[in-house]
Image: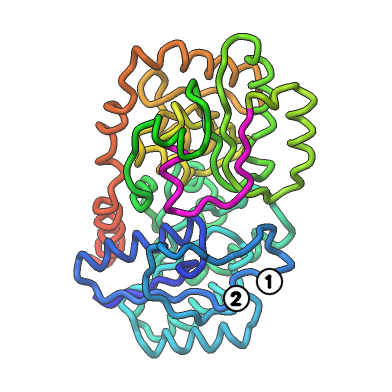
Amino acid sequence: MKIFILSSAYPFRGGIANFTGLLYHELIKLEHNVQVITFKRQYPSIFFPGKTQFENEENAKKIPSKRYVDSISPINWFKVGKLIKKESPDILIFNFWMPFFGPAFGTIGKIVKKNNHTKIVSICHNVIPHERKPGDIVFTKYFFRSVDYFVTMSKAVTDDLLKIKPDAKYKLLFHPVYSNFGETIPKQEALAKLNIPDGNTLLFFGFIRDYKGLDTLLEAVGLLKNEFKFKLIIAGEFYVDRSKYIDLINRLGISDFVILFEKFIPASEVKYYFSAADAVVLPYKDATQSGIMQICNNFLKPVIATNVGGLGEIVKDDYNGYLTEPKNPSALAEAIRKFFERKDKIDFASNIKNELSKFSWEKFVEEMMNLVNEKDS
């Protein structure tokens, strides 16, 4: 089958690009003819809060991609749409995560559909964004008009999809495991690599945005600082004003408890941060599903998470982690306390391993292809 994927992909960096790479490899394994189309301009630099949009690691796992799409050029959208229409793939898959891309994706999809052959699938990482802006709903609806089938990865995203497109043909599938970061290494080796002293450790990982609740976690650390010794590793690039978080650390008097790696973590280094941690904390104020959750599963790490979005569909108390209510430092502190009290009594890693079959790429692709095929039967 001839399949095109239009998405962020190598040489761009980040979770969506990683997802695209793993999807590409799974489809290739099934002997499909797969082509990846990505951006020549993904975000205008004025709108991008990070230091770079591109993968700059020498050992990055590359996939072949064609850099065709300019996210802000309508003329370009028509050209790309006509190109894909002429190529006439059996399936065109869009990874959709932000309404900003709705006009480009919607225009390309509308043109491609004129060939009366290509089926269009949207894998929805988000439908309604965490940080909303004017035009979000309009842009998303415009794109969705060209989509035949939708894949969602949490009930929260499914609910958002059906609010915008009640008649959507969709399938709810779990976000697959991010298996491209290697395997767990011994904790002592990871701590030594990061120059972190031995002891209890928690990890907050990924781009730092306000909706991810780092402030709630820092306040929880403040409540626990006199009870026992531990370190909170914060590893990620600030996509918001960092000063308010640094000020909060100083005001709470927890600088001795916090180790900050203020940078984008390249794929080859991810294993050190997760292997160094006893548990990963996802204190989100709002969420759909979380790619970080599936990195945790890859490294068999328990998760202490707030019960928002799809996190509650995966995290089970006393099994693979703990759930708590959002925006509540006291409740989060209690969940952290409970984890450290029980971490030597519960085999979290074995429990997580028992769940991994739910999150395989093989199952994800099989179910996605079933969605496309069953609607035509």
Q: Residue at x 73, y 29 (%)?
A: 249
Q: Distance between the residues labelled 2 and 1?
A: 7 Å
The answer to which image quadrant residue 51 occupies is: bottom right
9 shown above or below 14: below
- The quarter in which the C terminus is drawn is bottom left
The answer to whether 372 is drawn above or below residue 106 in the figure is above
Is residue 10 shown left or right of residue 243? left
Q: In which quarter of the image is residue 32?
A: bottom left
Q: Name the residue under label 1.
A: 44
- The residue wearing badge 2 is 41
| Magenta-tinted stretch | 258-274
Q: What residue type is labelled 1?
A: Pro
Q: Residue 23, how many percent across, how many down?
A: 34, 61
Residue 173 seen by the camera: no
Residue in the foreground of this view, choosing between 268 and 110: 268
Quarter of the rendering occupied by the N terminus: bottom left
Secondary element at tag 2: strand
In the rendering, at what x and y percent does residue 253 appear?
75, 21
Contact between marks 2 and 1 (CB within 8 A): the answer is yes
Q: Please state which of residues 271 and 196 is positioned toward the viewer in this rendering.
A: 196
Whether the magenta-drawn stretch holds residue 264 is answered as yes
Q: Residue at position x 42%, y 36% from top? A: 190
Q: Nearer the viewer, residue 147 or 360?
A: 360
Indicate whether residue 223 is drawn in magenta. no
Instruction: State the image quarter where residue 2 is shown.
Output: bottom left
Relative to 51, say whether 216 is above or below: above
| Relative to 198, 141 lies left or right | right
Residue 238 screen position, x and y as percent: 67, 48
Query: Which amino acid, by three-letter code, is at mark 2?
Result: Arg
Res. 234 in view: yes
